[in-house]
Image: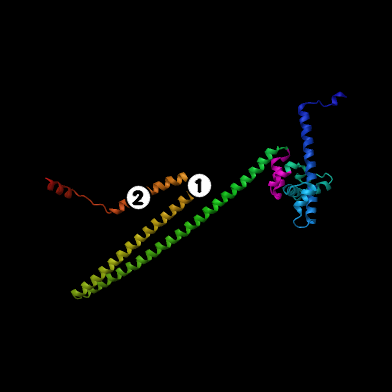
């Protein structure tokens, strides 16, 4: 008979205390829900502006406490009521095993995600601090996901802009090439006219006029070619500079140290380019000029 008596140890006592405390927490949650249900009923019956006064004088609740109790009723009342009507069936909601403290903390999780959260985190065996940290970690993960999505959207927008600019540049190149080809055709036509005129043995004056026209056309075509090349190089430099500034703007928000390094490097490159451009093309000193200078000094 004595073999059936469980030995009283600190571990057994702790288990009993935790069980009683958990049951008390469930009872406290059920009571809080019922109070919240009655608070909602009273609030609907009271005239506008009388709610705060009634709380203070009738039940000694602050509006914050009353709001929390009514929220508990809204979030958990229906499921706990359904559980009590199910006669202990196994398909009851996981929220029916929550204590008052656990239910309060889990208000930070949306209702449609709460049951999944409870199942994933084994809420019943977690301490208050562990549960609070788990809810906080979830919120942080959601925020990080939103920030990441925001960055991705920004990158997609910048990529779309770059793609549009690239298409614009490609069209410019096509236009310049087309313009250049047209001028080349004019030069070819004038050359043919000159050759035909020479075959007909025209006067020297006629040949001179045709040669002058050909020279003018070739000069114009050459200038058009140089102008087209210069325009392409200029636009590429401007667009590259604009994209560099955009990149530095993005880095200023994400990695200011890297931004500053890139900015200093780019600044030195621009300074060197400007310094070189001021004296371009450089004066070429030949051996002849060096020998002449040496002879003069002698």
Residue 158 lies, in percent from the top left, at 50, 55
Residue drawn at the location 37% of the way across and 58% of the way down: 234
Q: Residues within 10 Å of mark 1 (few under 14, many from 20)?
A: few
Whichever of labels 2 and 1 marks the residue nearer the N terminus, that label is 1
The image quadrant that residue 50 belongs to is bottom right
Q: Residues within 10 Å of mark 2 (few under 14, many from 20)?
A: few
Q: Residue furthest right?
A: 1
Residue 45 is a magenta residue? no
Residue drawn at the location 77% of the way across and 36% of the way down: 21
Residue 108 falls left or right of residue 190? right
In the displayed structure, 167 sits above or below 6; it is below
Q: CA distance from mark 2 to mark 1?
A: 27 Å
The image quadrant that residue 99 belongs to is top right
Q: Which residues are magenta?
A: 103-124
In front of the other: 199 or 75: 75
Residue 169 falls left or right of residue 132? left
Residue 122 is a magenta residue? yes
The residue that label 2 is drawn on is 271
| Residue 10 shows in this picture | yes
Residue 55 lies, in percent from the top left, at 77, 50
The quadrant in which the C terminus is found is: top left
Residue 229 lies, in percent from the top left, at 34, 60
The image quadrant that residue 213 belongs to is bottom left
User: Can you tell which mark lies on residue 43?
Assistant: none
In the displayed structure, 168 sits above or below 191; it is above
The residue that label 1 is drawn on is 254
């Amino acid at each position: 008979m004595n073999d059936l008596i469980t030995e009283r140890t600190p571990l057994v006592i702790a288990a009993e205390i935790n069980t009683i405390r958990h049951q008390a927490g469930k009872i406290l949650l059920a009571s809080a829900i019922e109070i919240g249900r009655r608070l909602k009923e009273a609030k609907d019956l009271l005239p506008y502006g009388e709610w705060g006064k009634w709380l203070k004088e009738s039940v000694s609740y602050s509006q914050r406490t009353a709001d929390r109790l009514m929220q508990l009723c809204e979030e958990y009342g229906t499921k706990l009521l359904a559980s009590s009507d199910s006669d202990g069936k196994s398909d009851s909601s996981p929220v029916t095993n929550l204590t008052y403290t656990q239910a309060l903390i889990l208000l930070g999780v949306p209702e449609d995600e709460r049951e999944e959260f409870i199942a994933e985190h084994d809420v019943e065996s977690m301490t208050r601090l562990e549960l609070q940290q788990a809810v906080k970690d979830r919120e942080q993960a959601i925020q990080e996901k939103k920030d990441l999505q925001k960055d991705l959207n920004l990158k997609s927008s910048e990529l779309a802009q770059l793609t549009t600019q690239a298409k614009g540049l490609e069209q410019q190149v096509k236009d310049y090439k087309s313009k250049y080809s047209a001028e080349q055709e004019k030069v070819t036509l004038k050359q043919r006219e000159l050759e035909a005129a020479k075959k007909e043995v025209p006067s020297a004056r006629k040949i001179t006029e045709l040669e002058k026209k050909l020279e003018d056309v070739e000069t114009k075509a050459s200038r058009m070619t140089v102008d087209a090349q210069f325009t392409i190089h200029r636009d590429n430099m401007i667009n590259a500079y604009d994209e560099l500034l955009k990149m530095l703007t993005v880095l200023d928000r994400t990695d200011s140290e890297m931004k500053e390094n890139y900015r200093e490097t780019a600044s030195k490159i621009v300074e060197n380019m400007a310094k070189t451009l001021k004296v371009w093309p450089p004066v070429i000193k030949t051996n002849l000029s060096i020998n002449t200078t040496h002879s003069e000094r002698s």
